[in-house]
Structure formats: structure tokens, C-alpha cells
Image: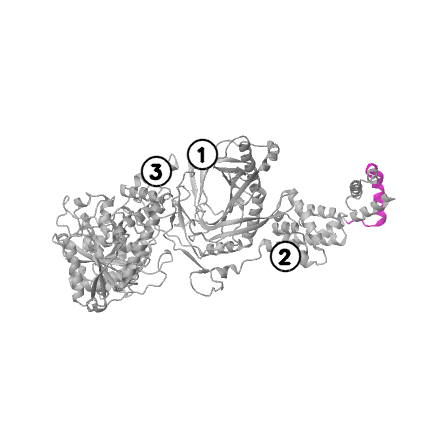
Amino acid sequence: MYRKLLFSKSSCRRLSTQYQVAKAQLQDWKSVVGLEVHAQLLTKSKLFSGSSNVFGAPLNTAVSYFDASLPGTLPVLNRKCVEIGIKTAAALGCRINEVSMFDRKHYFYADLPVGYQITQQRAALANDGELKFPVIVPGKKTYYKKARLLQLQLEQDSGKSLHDEELKRSLVDLNRAGAPLIELVFAPDLETGEEASSLVKELILILKSLHACSCKMEEGALRVDANISIHKCGEPFGVRTEVKNIGSVRSISQAITYEIQRQFDVVSKGGTITNETRSWDATTRCTIPMRDKEVLQDYRFMPEPNLPPLRLNLSSSADSSTSSDIISVASITKDIPELPEDTRSNLVKTYQLNQDVAVILVNEPVLLEYFLNVIEHIPSIPAKLVTNFLINDLLTFCNKANIDVESCQLTYTHLEDILTALNAGTINLQACRQLIEILHQDPTQNVQTLIRDRNMEQITEDETIEQLCRQAIERQEQAVKQYKSGKKKALFAIVGEVSKLSKQKANMKMVVAYLEKMLKS
Amino acid sequence: MKRHLQLTIKQLSASYADGSISPRLVVDHALDDAVKLKHLNAFIRISPENSLHQGKESEHRYENKNQLSVLDGVPIAIKDNFCTKNLTTTCASGMLSNFVPPYNATVCERLAASGTVLVGKTNMDQFAMGSGTVDSIFGPTKNIWSNDLSDNKWHIAGGSSGGSATAVAAGICYAAIGSDTGGSTRNPASYCGVVGLKPTYGLVSRHGLIPLVNSMDVPGVFTRNVSDCVDILNAIAGPDAKDSTTIRRPFKKIDIPFFEDFDLRNVRVGIPKEYHCEGLTKEVLETWMKVADLLEDNGAHVEQVSLPNTAASIFVYSILNQCEVASNMARYDGIEYGHRAGNESSTEELYANTRAEGFNTVVKTRILTGNYFLLRKNYQKYFEKALRVRRLIADDFKRVFETPKNNEKIVDVLLTPTTLSDAPLYSDFISQSNRDQCAVQDFCTQPANMAGIPAISIPIRLSKRGLPIGLQLMSRSLNEEMLLRVAGWIEAQVEFDCLENEQIYAARS
């Protein structure tokens, strides 16, 4: 289900710093989060019509007579959508139903020309799945969480309305009307915003690997609604609110964290939570109430009489040879590719990576691809050196530059050259970082040339290192004193000084060894 | 009297082929008659330019001996709830008074591909909700068998496909397409003295038929004889990728050479006792019994059977009908097509005014009632329960046709009345509400829609008032061939002359 809501004009009330104070008392309270995810299916045509299903087509050009609700037109189920639905359901461990049915859900809205949405309410395509996913919270150990998938259903998307407040005019674009969606209804098994965003991240990885959905949240290809409530430990669940219009994975965590805190704030001031729909405002970073016109709506569900029940062949033999119209589930599920969790455990097993590293690699498909390529092409480079570089240097650079790994200009050849040089000891890590920056600015450059022209080679001659260390010891008297008095951490200051003196080119391993030796005496 | 009107479609097309009759002439006559009989109000719109053009094309094909089918050059009419490309399709409603479909219904497409000539679109009850063709924004259709067409002395044509029945009964067309949801083809066929077939649900595509009740709607066929009915059915039946509810199995064309030679000795005819119901007139009962005797006397096994849930059927039909109507009518909001009210101050206002202006009281009542039944709190009590009873009704038929209990024998066809009486006077008919009328008018016909089985109404004789009386035959799903064979045999025996009425003579003398 995907409803249209109107915003209320009420201004956003920011709850800011008192969070810190409130957090202490929150311990007696538990938050409960459930997600409903709509994913637009990557198909050539729509769910029940032959018109094209592409994002960004010129307004009202991908609209068949059926999509425009012309009287007398009938829905014809797109087989491809069912196949993608089955694949997704299988990947999420669902029970796929031999018979599922379509229903009409009625409500009036200008971008819903027929007056009802065709969905699966009574008998969905699949039920009772489970998604297990790693939760990454910065500064905490990665842990695994499970959420039950209650239902996976096929349904139509609506069109889009545009309201021109000044001209008092509404415009409708029906390109999206009738586009195929799967709705995934998860049980309220989550507790925090981070868990929710981690669930969605995992779901995105799965949907992408199945080519089920582009998962571009900014295009609305993946839409996440969150149901949130809080209750005192040992008491029944509280009244929940629904948060909509979450436009990015990062916002999921922010919106839910905000909403949990807001609810706690209301309750701790003696207020009560009302069952309402709220909208996430990414600019002000808070949820604001929506005027939900459908709150009192009775959708008057009714079986869709123009579509016979959808029957699937559940027998285990993948017999696709029969000319029958009935889709064989086995013939579809046999093509399911490796899923993210399998990839992680393979990485841990094959390359002895630690779990957190595997999680990060799988979350960043580009990094994973780089990793696997480097390991294959230059087996002499240790896996750990590669992952350290990819995660601590490349990914960190991207995060600081606020770009996706995909949009980093560094090419695979650059990467190979840098790692080869690093592994050979030609350059040190600092030089690597500089190279990333330079190459991102100008990807036409060549790594070897850069190292040569800009004198980036690492300093490894004993005499030079020894001399640099001596200089540093002289300059860092204070640190030396501290170190000698037992404060081992003070060594870093001296190491840093060496690095500075060598213009970041000294071999740090040698520097540490020299310094330790020199300061002992 | 135009001599070619007595011909069957096969004979007509043979005459076209040997050059003794010209398709253009026949089309001319059809258009002339449509104008002369305008006062019957059979047509909402005739399309003379189109028909003349098609007639000319057909003539060329015969000249070149490449006619498309036995239907080439045959004038037909289509009920105004089938979408016809570039030809206004109104459903006799204000809501669609300006609706010009950009596409053809499958039935229209197939008939056009067979070479038929479309004379026009016929009158009906608004959105096919009715059994009299009296609730049309274009006014009621008058029964051609009425002795007096003046004032309130005329009889109704029946409905909701009264326009199509009249176009055929009046000899304007050789065949017409209607729709049948609860009897909308068979009822006017019976009142107008023509053959009316409701095929098995799913045998003929509904694509392009503006729906009343999707799970019961079937395109229906009107002709003056059973042979013509077979020819039309053969042209329109069969799977359609655009309608997922059509039966996937390819349709095998029906071929019945001589109805008279049909041997009745292997035919088992059931007379369901529940159809001997309250309100059944003596004349209809007599007709029913006479034909049953006729069948038995000629070797058929005739026996009484029971369909115990018949009486519940009409109530259940009414609930399901209203629920689907409520849903199907939701699309008429004035945004994409159809009537749009002037007030655009808000979307809600626009919807409300558009729908208030575009629908008549009958449609509005059904929408409101249907939505009430579908409310979450009522769904189980009404809709779900109705579905369960519908299953019982279908099981009743299954038992007599396929899986008998105890020592019962199965039957091939059921013989029943189509309507309880001959055509009522308009003045009598409108003295009751649409709802009450439908409950009476559809009593014998809607069970076949509930079960999806084929049924046909054939004219038998005239009542004392000089109005036709028809009887209904029903059979198991996809058993059209048996149904039509028996119907053809009865037709040959009773020798009813569809065209023998004063209005036709008056118009053509």
C-alpha cells in the first residue's frame, strides 16, 4: 500500500540538546521499529499493462489505456513481475504460496485514475520470510540482527500529483501509474534507527544482486515507511506513529532515532503519543505530522474479479519444459545468485578476513570487486594489505570527500599500481593517500610517473632515517622526557615529527624501530 | 416486406456471393429501416457513413470472391456499452455522453474482421443496470410487438439490451451484440421474440465491454434464428490475451447442419421445479409445459429436477452486483474522460459534483449500497456470505449436469421460462422501482450468470395479447453445441415468425 498524504503547515519543532539529558532515563524504555518497504521492480513493462516502466520518461508518455483507466480495459498480469517476486521471496526465505490472489483497495485520488489499487491483501505471493543482517554502529562492534518478513506482495504503484498552490491547480502524471511494486512488510523486530538502516542496506544488496530493483531511493524506486513506538520494559507496545518520506538510507537511521527520541520526550513530559503519520524532513532533520486524509478511510477491499488466482508450480523439479502458463518456482529459484551473507562468509573463510572487514566490503560492491580483482591478478600482495588500503584509505577518503565509492575517479589500474608500489615498499601509506587525492582530481595521471616526478618514493636508507630520528628527538624534548618516564604513547609525537621532517616519506616501520632503539640508551 | 429479411445469414451471404443480392442494397435498407423505426428508439447512434463505406467494401470483396467470412456484408448492431473506436460509447449515461473510445472491444474487432457492417450503437439501461431499457438518458426503447405505440400503451422491450433486441426484431439488423449479466440479453430476447444467447463465462472476451459485474458479464448474441446465432458465436468466441478470464482452450467452431434431423432420443431434459415460481403467468407456464411435452413426445428423456438454492440466487446476485458496481464506477471521476462538473474548487468537490451529475438514481443507489456491503465491518456478513451462496448455486447446476447424487440422473439441458410473463406495459413497469423490477425480471435468468453456464432464450409463441413468449435452455459450461442443437430443434417445431408483427408491416408498407 502506498498512500498519498498532504503536509500540514505546522512548523517543525526541534528537539535538540535535551536528548543527552533524557537518554539516561530512556534505559527503562524500549523502542520498537517495524518497516514497510516498497520496491519498484526492474521490468520493461508495468504490472498489468504493456506500457513502458522507466524512470524519467516525458510526462504522461508511458500510459496505456489501462493505466488511464479507460472503461472496458482489463488487467493482464506481467509474468516477469511474478518471477522477480518469487526470486525475491526465495532469497528472503519466504514460504511461497501455491495460490495467491489480487484485491482491489479503494480510495479516491487524482493520481489513482481507476479509484482503486490492485494489490494482494488476503492471499499474498509469499509470507513468513526472515532477513538476517549485520548492524554497523560506528564505534561499536558489528552484530547480527533478524527481522521476520511477514508478507511479500505484488501491487500497483500510483501516478504522481503536482499541486501548484499559487495557480490553485493540480497536475497529474500517470507514467508511474500501474508500475510494478513489491511491498515487504517486516515484523516490528527492530529497536533502533541503525538497525533499520542496516536492514534496508542488506535488503538493497539483495534486491540489487537479484536485479529486482534499482533501489534508487532518490528516484522513489525504494520507499521505506517506519512504524515506531516506545513502551516501558515489561509493558505492552505503545501507540505507534508511522514515518514516511524517508529519502535515503542515511535518513532512515536519522528519522527513526529522531522519532524515538521525540516520543520519549513527549512521554517523559507526561504527554501521550497519538497514532499518526509523520513525514521526515531531511533539511530540518525532524519528523512533522502529516494531515492524513485517509486516517478514517475504509478501503473496502474486494477480490479483483478480472484476474484469476495466480497459481504457481511448487514441485521441486525445475521443469520449465512444459508449455503450461503456470510458473515453476523451482526453475526460477535455481538462478538465484550468491547473496550478501554468503559472500561475507566466503570472504572470511577464503581470505581469513575478519568479519567487520567482510561486512564493509560487501556493503561497498565496488570495493569488493576491487578486492577480488587484486587478489586474483597480484596474488603476491597480502589480502590484509589490500583490505586495509581499500577501507582505511580509499573508503575514508570517499567519506571525507562526501562521495560514493562509485563516484571516486580512481581507476582499477591506479589501484593496482598503488598497491604494487606499497607492497614493494616503494611508497608508504602517506604517499598512497596523496596519490588517491591527486588521481581523484585528475584520473589521466599515471601512478609510476607521479611517484617519480613528485619524489614520492619512501625513504628507507638507514643513515637518512637515523638522521631524521635524531633531529626529531632534538625537537621533541618534552615527548622524549615523557616517553622515558614510561609514557609509551609519547612516541607517536616523535614519530609524527619524523614524518613531518621527511615530508611524509620516511618508512614508518623503520622510524619506530630506530626511535625505540635510540631512546632506550 | 423486404424478402431478404427472411433469409438466414448463410442464405444471405450465399445470395451476396451469387450476385442476386447486393450488400450495399441490404445496408441501405438497414439504414432506411433504422430511420423509419426511429420511434422505437432502438439506437442511440447510427453511423450511416461508416456503414455505407463498409457495405461498399464488402461488395467489392464479393465481386473479387475474397469475402472475409459468412458474415461479410451482414448488418449488425452493437450495444452502447461496447467500446467502438472513434465512435461515441455512452452506456446510455450522462457520465459517458461524450466518451469516444480510442480502441475497439475484442468482440467489435472480431466482428469487423469478419466483414460485418456496423449500423449503429443500441439503447440500454444506464450502465446496463436495469431490465427494461427504460433508464436511458436517451429515453426508453419501445417493444415492436406493441399494438399501440402511442402514449402509455406500449410495452417495454426488456433489458438492459433492449435496443439490440429491437434492432434485430425489427429487421434492421441480422444480428446484434448485447451484454448479459443477469439476463440482459435473454430477457429482451424473450420480450421481443428473438433468439438471445448468453455464452459460457469466459468463452467470449469482455475486453472493451464496459463492465457491470466483471465476474458475471458476458457478451450476448441476438439473432432471428438459431443458425445465425451459431454463425455470430463462431466469429466472436475464443481466447483473448487481453482478457485474463477467457478460457485458454482454443474454441472449436460449432457446426450444426440441419436442426430438424437432430435425434432427441439421447437428450435428457431437466425441468427444475423451483422455476415454477410465484408470479409465473399461466400463459408462460402453459408454454413451458407444452414444449416439455413436445420434447418428450419426440423421444427426449424429460424429467423433473431440483435446484434447491434457486430462490436465494436473486438476493445474492443483487449483493454481488452492487458491490462490483460500487468498485467499477469508482473510475468515473471526471479527470481522465467523461463528464466533468464545472466546480473545480477542490478535487473532492470536482469528484462529488461530477458523480452527482453524471449518474442516475439507480446507479447512485447501487454505488452506495455496494460500498456499504464492502465496509470492513460488513464484508463478511454480506459479500463473503454471498460468495458462499453463489458457490451453492453453481453446485446445484453441477449436480444436475455432471455429478448426480443418489439415484438422480444427469441431464444435458434444463428447460425453464425466460421471463415470468410477456412484455409488461411501460406504465406498469415503471410503477415499481428498478430494484423490485430486477428481482422479478431476473429471477429465471441470473442463476446462469452466477454459475457461468451457457443459456439461450428462444421465442416460442405469441400470448393472447399478441406478445412473444420465450423459453430458456441452460446447459453445463462450454456445452453450447448441445444447447444450440436443442434450441434449433425446438425452433423448427414451433415455427415462430420473428417478423410477423404489425409495426414492421406498418413501417414497410
Query: Quadrant of residue A501 in the image?
Result: top right
* Residue B352's disc number: 3
Q: Secondary structure at mark 1?
A: loop
Q: What residue is at 18 percent from the left and 59 percent from the top?
A: B5
Q: Is residue B104 magenta?
A: no
Say which of B319 and B368 sits in front.
B319
Type of amino acid under label 1: Glu
Q: Quadrant of the C terminus of chain A?
A: top right
The verdict on a common chain for dots 3 and 1 is no
Q: Which residues are magenta?
A: A457-479
The residue labelled by disc 1 is A165
Any part of residue A397 in sight: yes
The residue labelled by disc 2 is A346
Most extreme residue toward the front is: A234
Spatial CA distance of label 1 from label 2 is 55 Å
Q: Secondary structure at mark 2?
A: helix
Q: Main secondary structure of the magenta part?
A: helix
The chain containing the residue under callout 2 comes to A
Spatial CA distance of label 2 from label 3 is 61 Å
Q: Position of residue B368 (x, y in %)?
A: 32, 41
Left/right placement of residue B242 relative to residue B460 reads right
The chain containing the residue under callout 3 comes to B
Number of the front mark, 2 or 3:
2
The chain containing the residue under callout 1 comes to A
Left/right placement of residue A518 relative to residue B78 reads right
